[in-house]
Image: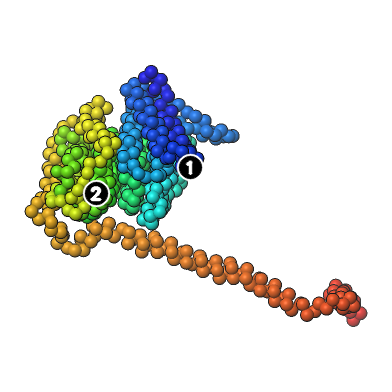
Amino acid sequence: MLSAASQSVWLIPGYSLFGAIASLLWSPGLIRLTGPRPSGYVNVIASGVAFLHSLLALWAMQPAQGSFRWLNTVGFELSFDWSSTTAALVALTVITGLTWFSQIYAIGYLERDWGWARFFGYLSLFEAGLSGLVLCDSLFFSYVILEMLTLGTYLIVGYWYNQPLVLTGARDAFLTKRIGDLILLVGVLGLLPLAGTWNFDQLAEWASTAEPSLALTAIAIALIAGPLGKCAQFPFHLWLDEAMEGPLPSTILRNAIVVVSGAWVLIRIQPIIAAVPVAETLLISVGVVTAICASLIAIAQVDVKRALSYLVSTWMGLVFIAVGAGQTIAAERLLLVYSLSMALLMMSVGTIVIRNISQDITQLGGLWSRRPLPALAFALGGLSLLAMPPFGGFWAWLGLAEGLWPVSPWLVIVLVFVLAAVGFGLARIFARIWGGPSKAMSVRSAEVLWLMVLPMLVLAGLTLHLPILLAQAGLLPQLNNLAIPLVWASLVGVATGTVVYYGPARNQPVQLPWQGLQNFFAQDFYTPILYRRTIVASVSFVATVLQFLDRTIVDGTATLMGLITLGSGQGLRYNVSGRTQGYALTMLLAIAVGSVFFLMPFLRQSFVLGLL
């Protein structure tokens, strides 16, 4: 049975795809007698089967591979190659498991929502795409799946399409990711003539012997653009903030695993990046800038979902640093720890948002006595994201620092700073929601349905056992002296955040010494304003010029030709009397004039000969 599960692992995306297609029976109202709720149950069952199949395949731990021919023409063959490596099986289990938990969570969160068929269909579409991505062994089809995930992001962010902010967030998320996808497509198509293949294993072999060139450098940079957009890295980081307008169960899935899809592709193309030093430097630079800036911006947010979204960009920045430094094992360790911990954070916050009808942390407080379970879950998820032993995050940070120290010690200093900022931000959120006195929006806060509590508690148990899971997977690094600054950075960040937001001065607004610096953080480093004054203004100017040219030259030329035709017709109408003798005279005159012009050369020649 275990062997069969390993060999048929390619069926796992099909379970979720079946659930998404089955939702079409309820979405347009083809089935009305039962209401939309059965569509959710069908998708939960399909995801449960996919999760069970993934667990069996992971338990068997028998790598398999295969290929499906997609296109075969003269001199060109395109196949969908797939392989189930150990990393792919672990990722597959995490994806199907978190999707299953999120769908169970969504049953309680969207209890009174009538859009179940669309919502659960979108979640299953995400699951099918992500499952296919981790199994895919072809760069071209990985790009195709990333495009499908971009469409899924647009659909699920715009789920509540009757709200203007939702439509704006869905549009911005789609367009921002499309920019990265288009640049990625250029790199994918340009790579084939050089490497002759899109298979990841064959690309790794080719990259190990490839000679650096301008074309290879351009292609490597283009390949990075896709993950930049998917992982919400600078300068494509704004879409994740605006994508928080969708339902919170979809935010759980998007923040925990959908964003990771770009990082997964980045890890697969790491051999190509390693062959181009410029690409490695670019990757590390983007990761450092995003990690530092996003961790500081998160501190200035009052919307809890937006604050956590910037922490997502921060963590993905660490993954970019790891891949740029060639630390793929550290990157995989970071992704495993991050996915479970961030899902736990979002689930705990969701139980507060659904009952208190507010995402503004300044309107909440004093919920520790009323909602202790979400508080414990949030604390556990936060500690797991920090370098606090013995939680999984400690080993993830330690493994990354251990790999960076011999190569670039200054990057370890960056890690220490980012770690302190993340600890401060998490302590701030916890103190604002669960600490201090109760406020108007948090005086009453009833417990949520067990369908929301159960997945949260199960995920909390898995997060507690992350070190054991890392040890079983052989991803546990050796303990060394670098653990000391990492632990101290975590403690300083958490302690500072606790004192500021839970101490005696917690009711006083936090003011930085320079108001401009505070506005700089609160306004997202003025990135939206910079976009509006540069890119948006440039596009608007070009659009205005093109509109002017279209109306004056293109439309003007057509209008002028029409006016000339009308004018000539008006002039000729007076020469048309309708009398036959007039037409005959006109024809005779035309023949006479034509004859003169035709005979003129001969007459001139005869005249000259006569003179001679």
Residue 3, label in figure: none
Q: Is residue 263 above or below residue 468?
A: below
Front-most of residues 423 and 539 = 423
Are the residues flagged by discs 2 and 1 in contact, CB closer than 8 Å?
no
The answer to whether residue 343 is visible is: yes
Q: Position of residue 46 (x, y in %)?
A: 40, 31
Question: Image quadrant of residue 591?
Answer: bottom right
Q: Position of residue 44 (x, y in %)?
A: 37, 33
> Which amino acid type is shown beneath numbered disc 2?
Asn
Front-most of residues 339 and 124 = 124
Cα–Cα span, label 2 and label 1: 32 Å
Q: Quadrant of the C terminus?
A: bottom right
The residue under the point 38% across, 55% down is: 163
Residue 29, label in figure: 1
Question: Image quadrant of residue 115?
Answer: top left
Q: Is residue 503 left or right of residue 300?
A: left
Which residue sits furthest left? 504
> Which amino acid type is shown beneath numbered disc 1?
Gly
The residue under the point 15% across, 48% down is: 366
Q: Position of residue 363 (x, y in %)?
A: 20, 54
Q: Position of residue 155 (x, y in %)?
A: 42, 46
Q: Which residue is mark 2?
A: 356
Dot 2 falls on a residue whose secondary structure is helix
